[in-house]
Image (cartoon, rainbow, N blue to C red):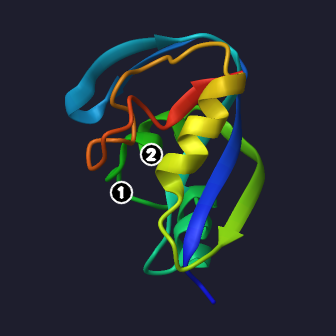
Amino acid sequence: MDKGSYILLIKLPEEKELEIGSLGVFEFEPGLYFYVGSGMNGLDKRVGRHLSDDKKKHWHIDYLLDEAEVVATVKFRTKERIECDLSNIVSEIADEIPVAGFGSSDCPCKTHLFKI
């Protein structure tokens, strides 16, 4: 099955000021971040796209990944949409929410990006 949700563990080596599409410009502190996403039409392809350097910016995460490195991925293969459930779980262990609305413009979650 190639459907499901995923978590990217992202390392940002230094402080960066980044424009995140229509969300605006934000300061990102160096450190580790979790990003929660879904790939209900192709989980492996979606995660592979995030790992690629050759892509057009389409999603909020694309702007961050221009400056950061994915150091680990976790895939949850399921027919159920669990992206928001995962975001709620990750939010319990996160240190902060760096950008409200990041990756969550199509759901009720506050964000899908967390600094840990």
- Report crowding for label 1: few under 14, some 14 to 19, many 20 or more residues within 10 A (C-alpha): few
The reply to whether discs 1 and 2 touch (Cβ–Cβ < 8 Å) is yes
- The quadrant where residue 96 appears: top right
The structure residue drawn at horizontal position 25% and vertical position 26%, both measured from the top left corner, is 23
Q: Is residue 40 left or right of residue 114?
A: left
From the top left corner, tell me how far across and down residue 59 is, in percent.
Answer: 36, 49
The structure residue drawn at horizontal position 36% and vertical position 57%, both measured from the top left corner, is 56
Q: Is residue 65 visible?
A: yes
| Residue picked out by circle 1 | 56
76 is higher (above) or lower (below) than 33: below
Viewer-side residue, 62 vs 44: 44
* Secondary structure type for disc 1: loop
From the top left corner, tell me how far across and down residue 115 is, in percent.
Answer: 64, 21
- The quadrant where residue 103 appears: top left
| Residue picked out by circle 2 | 62
From the top left corner, tell me how far across and down residue 14 is, in percent.
Answer: 67, 14
From the top left corner, tell me how far across and down residue 16 is, in percent.
Answer: 53, 14
Q: Is residue 71 left or right of residue 111?
A: right
Instruction: Name the quadrant of the N terminus.
Output: bottom right
The structure residue drawn at horizontal position 31% and vertical position 16%, both measured from the top left corner, is 25
Give the alpha-carbon distance from disc 1 to disc 2, as whole Å: 8 Å
Outermost bottom residue: 1
Disc assigned to residue 21 = none
Outermost right residue: 72
Count of numbered circles on the image: 2
Sequence order check: which comes first, mark 1 or mark 2?
1
Q: Is residue 12 visible?
A: no
55 is higher (above) or lower (below) than 13: below
51 is higher (above) or lower (below) than 39: above
Instruction: Indicate the amino acid at tag 2.
Output: Asp
Instruction: Indicate the amino acid at tag 1.
Output: Lys
